[in-house]
Image: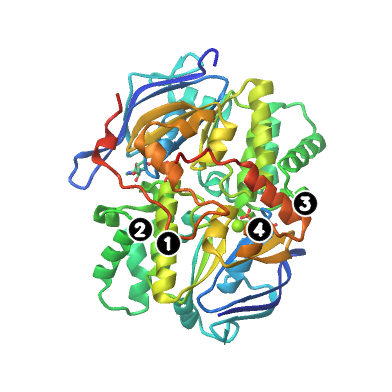
Amino acid sequence: MIEIENLNVRFGSAIAVESVNLLVGKGESFGLVGESGSGKSTLLRTVMGLNRNWTGTIRLNNQDIRSAGRAALVRTAQMVFQDPYASLHPRFTVGNALAEPMRINGLPNISRRTAELLELIGLSQDYASRFPHELSGGQRQRVAIARALSLSPRILLLDEPTSALDVSVQAEILNLLNRLREELGLTFLLVSHDLAVISYMCERLMVMQNARTVEVLTRGDLRAGALKQDYTRNLFRASLHGVRPGVQP
Amino acid sequence: MNRSLAVIENLGIAFSGEDGKPVHAVKGVSFSVGREKLGIVGESGSGKSLSCRALMGVLPPSASITASRLEFSGIDLLRASPRTRRQLRGGQMGMILQDPKFSLNPVMTVGRQIAEAVRLGDRRLSVSSIRRRVLEVLESVHIRGPERVYDLYPHELSGGMGQRAMIAMMVVREPELLIADEPTSALDVTVQAQVLEIMDELVRRRGMGLIFISHDLNLVSRFCDRVLVMYAGRIVETLEAGRLAEARHPYTRGLLACLPAIDGPLTPLPTLERQADWREIPA
Ligand SMILES: Nc1ncnc2c1ncn2[C@@H]1O[C@H](COP(=O)(O)OP(=O)(O)OP(=O)(O)O)[C@@H](O)[C@H]1O
Ligand SMILES: Nc1ncnc2c1ncn2[C@@H]1O[C@H](COP(=O)(O)OP(=O)(O)OP(=O)(O)O)[C@@H](O)[C@H]1O
Ligand SMILES: [Mg+2]
Ligand SMILES: [Mg+2]
């Protein structure tokens, strides 16, 4: 569903993604973890056609993104950005933000769908008239997720979708994403620095450091601690080190 | 905790709702912070950011605020002039906002913004030693290639780099009280540990007070000294951080159960059945 071959992305003389290959199957959920600044968001943004200066091949649902039109792409893939401020227009109310992509793409029953989307993310209907600055950080992130879902895309690119959320809302969103993936056969490419979230959500994952791939692991490898590279081992150790303050039996 | 740096008593924050009736976002919040690490956790929308913004004096203009006491370092903030409050914000009080890129100046390079903070701290420094100090502090927050990053604009930073740029700026300024709103949510665990170490050092060595808002319960229980739990605009519980697992309030206990684990089951995560009576302050 997502095929990336020998991707290189540059910003001026700096290289943000170097020689990355990635294959994500239909219906698969694939995780991306790694050092801050290692190129994870850049990779997702490039797949969405938001970067210019790149070489290599990217295919989504068998369409080469260089030749496929913008309209076809947005129906195939949608992205939830790491920084929800960046994806929500400050002068659009929540209701408008949700309805706008549907309107542009000529979808029917927009007001009903908008109401459903709000319900999906656990916000009451009065939030439709609010502006982004009138929301808390986590509420903004939820609206961004609903907006990405509004066009019923086949692929969701999720950049730290729950890192701004408290754990109870995180649990609801992760359950929701899993349910939608199952019901609609969605494919996920999910960035998170939380290995527990990755292990819960993804069948496979890629570890990145300094613009390059460190290794690709299955969920089984991650759970068994079967890691080949030192960088990943450190990451894993640091994650476990955060002992869970025992959930009482 | 010795002397309090900041005291909030009976804070209320309201907005006018659809029908003109006030909507209370924060209700009866009281707490104080000394030279310690005070964590605030709580549901999304429970009023964590707003409460801290009230202390900083950076609420949106549409917010109306009431409090019986709002003090910083013996200064009555309710009576302080806008000028005094501005001076406090630029000096003794610092805040890292939840959206770091939003609080950096979008049209000035990161290096210049930090340089400005360095310069204000010591006006005798030469241009070249200011630059050296900026590169040093960028390195101390583990930013790769500080020379390159010096010349980047905020929108050219990754999420975690933006957070670390904000932290670098605070390290340079050394405020008395630092309010950090989800300051490490975009950092991977290894970088996060290093950055927390820096904040911890400011508390231990400089006697800074730190208010640390985070949804990461593990992190808060490891890193902070005390934790406030907020729910629906109120503080529902105050705990010693290390004893978060012994939380009594059903909301806090429910929160702990919602966490996924690396080796946890793949069945749907438990979620909270929110109860109306959670809105009441427990006896
Ligand atoms: N528009 C841009 N101009 C210049 N450099 C950029 C731009 N966007 C990203 N970069 C650089 O590319 C590198 C990778 O950034 P990216 O945002 O992809 O990292 P990331 O892995 O998502 O990190 P994080 O986990 O902190 O979000 C960084 O060094 C960043 O400074
Ligand atoms: N300008 C505003 N106008 C109206 N309501 C607002 C405004 N700003 C915040 N609110 C509301 O006040 C409540 C508390 O917001 P706050 O930002 O303090 O939440 P929070 O606890 O920081 O949540 P999060 O963890 O999601 O960041 C939310 O329900 C939010 O929608
Ligand atoms: Mg990123
Ligand atoms: Mg907040």
Amino acid under disc 3: Gly
Q: Please tell me if label 4 and label 1 are on a single chain.
A: yes
Report the Cα–Cα distance between label 2 and label 4.
33 Å
**Mark 3 close to ligand 1, CB under 8 Å:** yes
Report the Cα–Cα distance between label 2 and label 1.
8 Å
Q: Please tell me if label 4 and label 3 are on a single chain.
A: no
Which image quarter: residue B16? top left
Mark 3 vs mark 2, foreground winner is 2
Q: Which mark is residue A13?
A: none
Amino acid under disc 2: Ile
Report the Cα–Cα distance between label 3 and label 1.
33 Å
Q: Secondary structure at mark 4?
A: helix
| Residue under pointer 1 | A145
Report the Cα–Cα distance between label 4 and label 3.
34 Å
Amino acid under disc 1: Ile
Q: Earlier in the sequence, mark 2 or mark 1?
A: 2
Query: Residue A30 at x, y = what percent?
Result: 58, 68
Chain of the residue that carries numbered disc 4 in the rendered image: A
Query: Residue A81 at x, y = what percent?
Result: 51, 60
Amino acid under disc 4: Ala
Residue at 65% x, 58% y: name it: A224
| Residue under pointer 3 | B145
Chain of the residue that carries numbered disc 3 in the rendered image: B
Would residue B80 appear left or right of A15 to someone viewing this image? left
Marks 2 and 4 close (CB-CB < 8 Å): no
For mark 2, does the 10 Å Cα neighbourhood hold few (<14), some (14 to 19), or many (20 or more) residues? some
For mark 4, does the 10 Å Cα neighbourhood hold few (<14), some (14 to 19), or many (20 or more) residues? few
Residue farthest to the front, as pictured: A249
| Residue under pointer 4 | A224
Q: Please tell me if label 3 and label 2 are on a single chain.
A: no
Q: Secondary structure at mark 2?
A: loop
